[in-house]
């Protein structure tokens, strides 16, 4: 009986560690990406993303398809050719963009929550980001996406 319990615990550990290993952040490679109901090109299109660099989280994989979830909890399957390594984040709250990585630095702009920000580089608490109009530093709290 004890051997069965130990075996069950070991199998549960491996299952959970594999589940968490599949959860990685990626970004959309194109400005138009089909999200499908299933992991196949024959599967119907569920919706279409029209935001290049949108960060998404991979939660499962099946051959050349990745099951993803976005910041609004929409999910579906995307072909791997439409994805790239994460290079962007989305603030979950409004943020201040600073000239340097310091609260005492010159504020440059107010970044609204939900805006896609391209990450250039990061240190422990700050990331240098770029938007269509601005370049500067934000604190890395309350963001959707993974910082490299």
Image (spheres, rainbow, N blue to C red):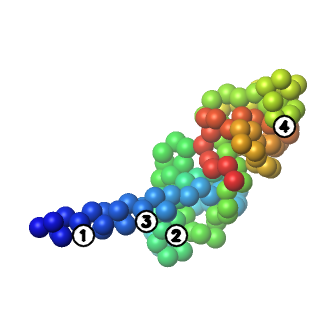
Residue under the image location 71 percent in, 29 percent down: 95
Residue in the picture at 67% in, 49% down: 147
State the residue lying farthest toward the bottom: 63
In the picture of the structure, the residue carrying the numbered disc 4 is: 136
- What element does badge 2 sit on? strand
Q: CA distance from mark 1 to mark 3?
A: 17 Å
Residues at marks 4 and 1, CA–CA distance in whole angstroms: 52 Å
Q: Is residue 70 above or below residue 84?
A: above
Disc 1/disc 2 C-alpha distance (Å)? 32 Å
- Identify the residue position indicated by label 2 in the image: 65
Note whether 34 is above or below 62 in the view shown: above
Q: Nearer the viewer, residue 51 or 116?
A: 116
Tell me: 9 left or right of 126. left
Q: Earlier in the sequence, mark 4 or mark 1?
A: 1
Q: Given this view, does label 4 or label 1 mark the residue nearer the observer?
A: 1
10 Å crowding of disc 1: few (<14), some (14-19), many (20+)? few
> For the residue labelled by badge 1, is the local secondary structure a helix, a strand or a loop?
helix
When asked about the image quadrant of residue 8, the answer is bottom left
Residue 7's disc is: 1
Instruction: Specify which label sits upstream in the sequence, 3 or 4.
Output: 3
Q: How far apart are the alpha carbons under marks 3 and 2?
A: 17 Å
In this rendering, the label closer to the viewer, 1 or 2: 1
Which numbered mark, 2 or 4, is in the foreground of this view?
A: 4
Mark 4: secondary structure: strand
The residue carrying mark 3 is 18
């Amino acid at each position: 009986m004890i051997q069965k319990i130990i075996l069950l615990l070991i199998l549960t550990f491996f299952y959970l560690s594999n589940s968490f290993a599949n959860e990685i952040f990626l970004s959309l490679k194109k400005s138009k990406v089909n999200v499908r109901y299933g992991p196949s090109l024959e599967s119907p299109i569920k919706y279409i993303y029209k935001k290049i660099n949108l960060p998404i989280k991979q939660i499962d994989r099946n051959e050349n398809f990745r099951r993803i979830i976005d910041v609004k909890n929409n999910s579906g399957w995307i072909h791997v050719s439409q994805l790239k390594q994460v290079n962007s984040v989305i603030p979950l709250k409004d943020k201040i963009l600073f000239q340097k990585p310091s609260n005492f630095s010159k504020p440059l702009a107010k970044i609204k929550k939900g805006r896609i920000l391209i990450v250039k580089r990061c240190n422990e608490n700050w990331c240098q980001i770029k938007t269509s109009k601005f370049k500067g530093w934000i604190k890395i709290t309350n963001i959707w996406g993974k910082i490299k």
